Image (tube, rainbow, N blue to C red):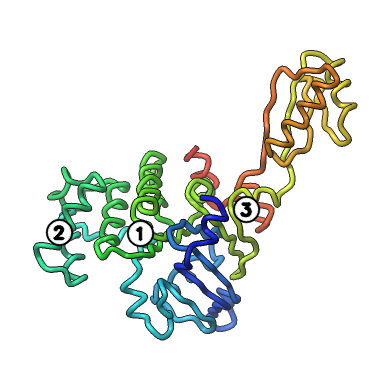
Amino acid sequence: MSPSATATRAAAVTATGLRKSYGEKVVLDGIDLHIPEGTVFALLGPNGAGKTTTVEILSTLLPADAGQATLAGRDLAKDPDGVRGAIGVTGQFAAVDGLLTAEENLTLMARLHHLDRAEGQRRAAELLERFDLTEAARKPASTFSGGMRRKLDLAMTLVGRPRIIFLDEPTTGLDPRSRRTMWEIIRSLVADEGVTVFLTTQYLEEADQLADHIAVLDHGRLIAQGTADELKRRVPGGHIRLEFGDAGSLMAAAGLFASVTTDFETFALQVPSDGSAATVRAVLDILDDAGLRAETLLVRTPDLDDVFLALTGKSDPAANSFTESH
């Protein structure tokens, strides 16, 4: 979704100056948020950055020490019941009763939402079908795989048809296939139902794949916000790698650009680049005007892993899982 499209949408979540401390330990140090309706917002940060605390405050589970917030038009401090009626929360660990079947877990949630018996059964059947759990509907949740439990957990969150869904590290511990299945479910919720998703994650590829807007939280402060592409452009290191057939062509090409890196073993030239099509086109035009042709071309732009490292000074806390999920 383009930035201009999201800019015209009403706000699903706004927050100004949210603060939270435990004694002398400052967990949130005055954060501001603006999340348009019908979008996916991802909050990134290392362990202990304050991601879960932010979710707990915005979902009425924890009071803020200072600041204001509005969710779905309801004031967090003045109308917490109204906020709870508009949101759904899926935590880091599946809140599924293993002794109950999938169907029983969903009908229990329907009763908690004060749906009558018939409507609760209809809603349960609808969600079981949507999450591909119909065949497992009458099996105890304790027999489910991790991916099935996470799907059931999210289905339970949706029983009350929330307009804003908080997903706190929803794919932690899932294998790559289950993770991608969850991504497709999240995309469909936004595209088909117009819900707003507030996602916290340590999987950088997850934010890159899903989020319309990303914020990076470190030591309780928001240190960067923007689209994935905007954040990547803040980090140096992007380049175009060109490989030539011989050393003569390599040297001739190197003389055409002000700042390059050469590799004589592979006859490769690296030209700094922002990764845009315009820059690639300009480089190729310069080579063409000089009568030179590269045998191979590779455009390398910084990824969110580079952004995370540059902004927080830490490597990706889920680096092993990030590599696994490619």
Toward the front, the furthest residue is 8
State the image coordinates of residue 138 (x, y, percent, origin top left). 12, 50
Q: Residue at x 27, y 56 (%)?
A: 155
In the rendered image, which quarter is residue 237 located in? top right
Say above or below: 266 vs 219.
above
**10 sits to left or right of 189:** right
Q: Which residue carries the number 1 mark?
A: 93
Q: Between disc 3 and disc 2, whose residue precedes?
A: 2
Q: Which residue carries the number 2 mark?
A: 104
Judge depth for marks 2 and 1 and give the one in front: 2
Q: Between disc 3 and disc 1, whose residue precedes?
A: 1
Q: Amino acid at mark 2?
A: Glu
The numbered mark at residue 308 is: 3
Label 3 close to label 2 by CB (< 8 Å): no
Q: Secondary structure at mark 3?
A: helix
Q: Residue at x 48, y 39 (%)?
A: 324
State the image coordinates of residue 69 (x, y, percent, origin top left). 48, 77
The numbered mark at residue 18 is: none
Judge depth for marks 3 and 1 and give the one in front: 3
Q: Amino acid at mark 1?
A: Phe
Q: CA distance from mark 2 to mark 1?
A: 19 Å
Say above or below: 236 vs 243.
below
